[in-house]
Image: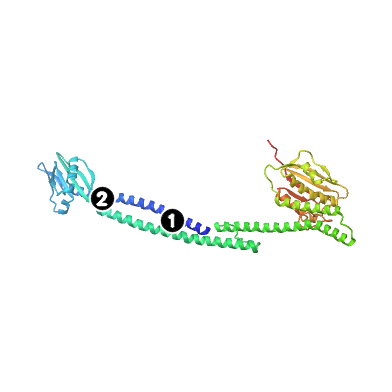
Amino acid sequence: MAVTGFRKRVVALTVLIATAVVAVLVVVSHVLLSRVTDADARDLARTRAEAVAANVTAKGGRVVLTENGSEALDEVAWVYADGRLLDGNVPPSVVDRVEELADSGRSQTASVGDYLLYARKVPIDGHHVMVIVRVDLTPYETSEQRSLTLSLILGGLTILLAGGVAHIVVRRALRVVHEMAALADEWGHHETGRRFNLGVPRDEFGELGRTLDHLLERVDNALADERRLTDEIAHELRTPLTVLRAEAQLAQLSGGPVAPEAVLSEVDRLDAAITTLLRAARARTDKGTRCDLRSAARQAIAGRAVEVAIPSKVEVAVAADVAVSLLSPLLENGLRHARSRVWITARTQGEAIVVDVLDDGPGFDPADVDRVFEAGVSGGDGYGLGLPVVRRIAASAGAEVRAIADGRGHVEVTLPAARATT
């Protein structure tokens, strides 16, 4: 329905533009033709008047006309000398106007009904001589009407042709677009790796192909993110569930009760993992969001043996719970692999705050620093637990996290610094 509506709008717009163009051309051509025919009629009148005036002369003090045997000319040309009709037969319908022109004493034109009258003064000393001719305008008007009718017919055919061509062209163009959209939709559901790959765009269809390729790329990335999230959820929740199952099986075999401390600890761990995953899915960088980094770090430590070397009044442009969710899994990894010491520092780098989470453990293998944030991947002696979630939270909050292989446990988190308020 939308495609049909668009096609109708394009065809209607084409017809409207064609109609406007044709109307302008018809009006302009009719005006020009009217001026041309008017000029032709005046030229004919002047020619006739000059031909008659050439036969007027003075003999013996009187104005005389050279003998002219054309009776037809007498009906369209008249000679007045000193206020009286010298030659010609003036029709009653124009006699008043002809006599008025004869008395005027100057050359001029006038229209009477379907006729053009032209008065020409003949210079003869001592006499007032006027030659008046008549030109029938009916043939010219008929020619104009025929030309206008033909122009309207041709204009109407042009408008119909423009609408038909627009309909065909738009239908073919939209068929290509529809086919490309259908293919893109099919690929997005079943073959996310397929692309149009039309190369450098040379026309609108090339632009459309490139846009659809980008759309398919985003769909593919979204599906990959969904799979990674599923892996992260399975990875984060498997460990506490396994511990709970082991405690229950141990109690079943021994016949004793399940230790409440162990159950509560793993339930808390499970709840923390779920909360972290939810924060990762919902984290966004909102304008004006900020928190005190030192307070967030102490909240992430939660009483654990971690040294804090973060200056006071250092603010970052992320929410406090997001900062806690970023730092808590990193601190947990550090405590798990440290020999004796875990500490956290912060420094300013341009418009960002860089947080270093360090421990004196074996650190990351240089070959694994690019893979430790993938779900289920462990480097060294078990690194990787919680790090995929940290990467997801960081990306959602506009931050960056990376592992550094420098002979110790070292993860660097780059957070946007909060702008100073005015």
The crowd level at tag 2 (other Cα within 10 Å; few <14, some 14-19, many 20+) is many
For the point 60% across and 63% down, which residue is it? 183
What x and y, as percent, mark residue 345?
Answer: 80, 43
Is the C-beta separation of discs 2 and 1 under 8 Å?
Answer: no
Residue in front for this viewpoint, 124 or 27? 27
The residue positioned 71% from the left and 59% from the top of the image is: 227
Marked residue nearer the N-terminal end (2 or 1): 1
At x 73% / y 58%, what residue is drawn?
230
Mark 2 secondary-structure assignment: helix
Q: Could you say which quadrant of the image residue 247 lies in?
A: bottom right
Task: Judge left or right: residue 368 versus residue 145.
Answer: right
Q: Position of residue 413 (x, y in %)?
A: 76, 47
Which color scheme did the rendering employ for the protein? rainbow
Amino acid bearing label 1: Val
- Residues at marks 2 and 1, CA–CA distance in whole angstroms: 38 Å
Amino acid identity at mark 2? Ala
Q: Which residue is mark 1?
A: 15
Task: Return the x and y of residue 93 as percentages of the image width and height.
Answer: 18, 48
Q: Which residue is under mark 2? A: 41
Q: Position of residue 69 (x, y in %)?
A: 13, 53
Residue 112, relative to residue 154: is it above or below? Answer: above
Q: Callout 1: 10 Å neighbours few (<14), some, many (20+)?
A: many
Quadrant location of residue 199? Answer: bottom right
Can residue 70 be seen here? no
| Residue 9 in sight from this viewpoint | yes
Which residue is situated farthest in the top direction here? 422
